[in-house]
Image: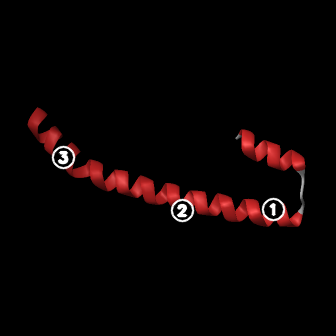
Amino acid sequence: MMKATGISGTNVHPRTFSNSVESLKYLNRGIIVFFLLFYHIRCDSFFAIYFIIT
């Protein structure tokens, strides 16, 4: 049981890690694009402060 779960863990972990990294990169791109569009639409200092805080 322990060896089987260890082998499955080592097999699954790199895939899930690479998927999470790719999703984080895509999420960061989406947030940056949304922030640039929103900043061009309305330059609110409140939104900039809120974006920096969160």
Pointer 3 residue: 8
Picture quarter containing residue 37? bottom right
Give the mark, 1 or 3, whose residue is nearer the N terminus.
3
- Up-down: is 32 above or below 5? below
Image check: 41 left or right of 21?
right
Residue at 79% x, 43% y is 50
Badge 2 amino acid: Tyr
Pointer 1 residue: 38
Picture quarter containing residue 42? bottom right
Q: Quadrant of the N terminus?
A: top left
How far apart, in angstroms, are the residues tagged by discs 1 and 2?
18 Å
Give the mark, 2 or 3, whose residue is nearer the N terminus.
3
- Mark 2 secondary-structure assignment: helix
Q: Position of residue 11 (x, y in %)?
A: 20, 51
Badge 1 amino acid: Phe
How far apart, in angstroms, are the residues tagged by discs 1 and 3?
44 Å
- Mark 3 secondary-structure assignment: helix
